Amino acid sequence: MSEAIRIRATVRDGVGEIRTMLPHPMESGQRRGPSGDPIPAHYIETLTVEHNGRVVVSGRLGPAVAANPLFAFYLEGAAPGDRVRVSWRDNHGASRSDEALFA
């Protein structure tokens, strides 16, 4: 199983900030290894962020995104104790999903 998604979710004055780091190699398929052979493409294709079970961010990524991407989102109406869930799926069919509570 892949490394856990790091999620920091904080609230100030009713506005939530979600900062997340997705541990993933994000290989584009364009680079070559030490032997000169191409390194196969391996990257996140979809990213979803849910707030209390409701999708608030849904997007597609591609091979041009750097390894271990960091994303930040703001969300109105968040409150301490609300649940945030971050999920991804990559081009190899692997997926990961983790949750945190707003503080």
Image: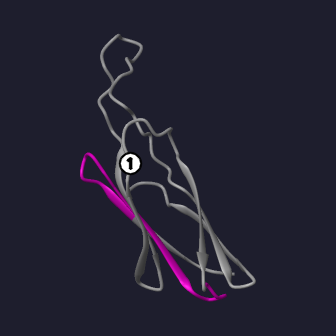
Q: Which residue is mark 1?
A: 61
Q: Nearer the viewer, residue 68 or 19?
A: 19
Residue found at x 36% / y 42%:
62
From the viewer's perspective, is 72 left or right of 26?
right
Q: Amino acid at mark 1?
A: Leu
Under circle 1, the secondary element is loop
Residue found at x 62% / y 89%:
81
Where does residue 51 sit, x and y in percent of width and height? 49, 80
Q: Is residue 88 visible?
A: yes
Where does residue 8 sit, x and y in percent of width and height? 64, 68
Picture quadrant where residue 71 is located: bottom right
Residue found at x 39% / y 18%:
33
First to last magenta residue range: 78-96
Where does residue 15 sit, x and y in percent of width and height? 67, 79
Q: Is residue 43 above or below residue 4?
A: above
Q: Is residue 72 above or below residue 28?
A: below
